[in-house]
Image (spheres, grey):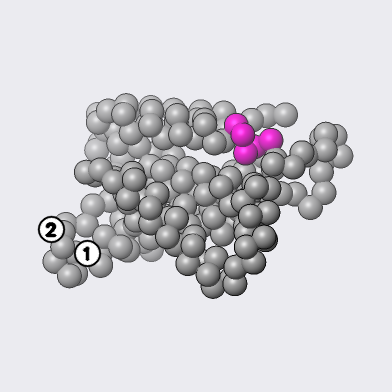
Amino acid sequence: MRSPTIETLLAFAAVFALQQALSVVDATLAAALFALQLPLEVRPWTLVTSVYAHDPTGLGHLLSNAVALSIVGFALERHTTRWRFHAFFVLTGAAAGAFQVLFNRLLLQVGLVGQALPVLGASGAVFALFGYVLAGNRLTGGLLDRIGLDPRWQLLLFLVAATLVTLATAAPGVALAAHFFGFLLGLLAGQANLLRPAEPEPDAPPMPEY
C-alpha cells in the first residue's frame, strides 16, 4: 500500500522545486500560485497550493514541517485510508491557513501589525494530525469517558490545549493562528474518530486500536 505520508513529502519537494524555478523567472507568478492572502476569492486555489508550499528563501521551513509530518504521519496512516489522510491534510491545512490570514487582517485593523503577510506552509495541517493523534487515541478517549466531562467543558479543555501548544511553538514569523486552529480541528476530529474507516478495505488487514 502506498504511503500518504511519503506522497505528501514528495509533494513538498516537488512544489518547493517549482517555487525555486519560478522565483528565478517570475517571483510575482510564484506568489500568485502559492501564497495565501486576502481576498481569498481572488486566488482560491492558493487555499490548497499554500499547504504544500514553503518559504522559498531557505530549507529550514520545509525541513521542519517534513520532520514533524514524518513523526506523526507514519504512525497515523496505519489507522486510516490513504484518501482519508490526504483529504484531512488538505482540508485542515486550508482551514488553518484561511484562519491565519483572517486573523492577520483583524490584527491589522486594530493596529497591532503593520501589514498582513501571506501564508505558506503545512504547519496547520501537521498540527491537525498531532491533535488528532492526541484526542483520537484509546488512552485519551478512555480518560475523557472516565471523567465524564460535559461536551462544553471538553471543548474548553481542547481550546486550552490548543492555546498551550500554540504558545509553546511561538517564534518570530510563525503562523501561530494556523497552529492553534489546526490543532483544535485535529482534537475535534480525533474525538469523533473521523479518520477511522467504517469498514476495512477488502484487501487490507484489520486495523488495530490505538
For residue 152, say whether it is visible: yes
Question: Magenta segment, which residues?
Answer: 74-78
In the displayed structure, does residue 177 sit left or right of residue 147? left
Q: Residue furthest front?
A: 147
Secondary structure, mark 2, is loop
The image shows residue 175 at horizontal and vertical percentages of 31, 49
Main structural element of the magenta stretch: helix, strand or loop? helix
Query: Residue at left 14%, top 66%?
Result: 111
Instruction: Name the amino acid, label 2.
Output: Gly
For residue 8, say whether it is visible: no
The image shows residue 98 at horizontal and vertical percentages of 39, 58
6 up-or-down from 143: above or below: above
- The earlier-in-sequence mark between 1 and 2 is 1
- Asked which quadrant contains residue 27, the reply is top left
**The N terminus: image quadrant:** top right
Magenta span contains residue 77? yes
Q: Which residue matches tag 2?
A: 114
- Asked which quadrant contains residue 12, the reply is top left
Q: Which residue matches tag 1?
A: 107
1 up-or-down from 135: above or below: above
Circles 1, 2 touching at the beta carbon (< 8 Å): no
Query: Residue at left 47%, top 67%?
Result: 156
How crowded pointer 2 is (Cα within 10 Å; few <14, some 14-19, many 20+) is rated as few
Q: Depth check: 47 or 69 in front? A: 69
The image shows residue 74 at horizontal and vertical percentages of 60, 31
Magenta span contains residue 137? no
Between the residue at mark 1 and the residue at mark 2, the CA separation in whole angstroms equals 9 Å
**The C terminus: image quadrant:** top right
Query: Residue at left 48%, top 57%?
Result: 184
Secondary structure, mark 1, is helix
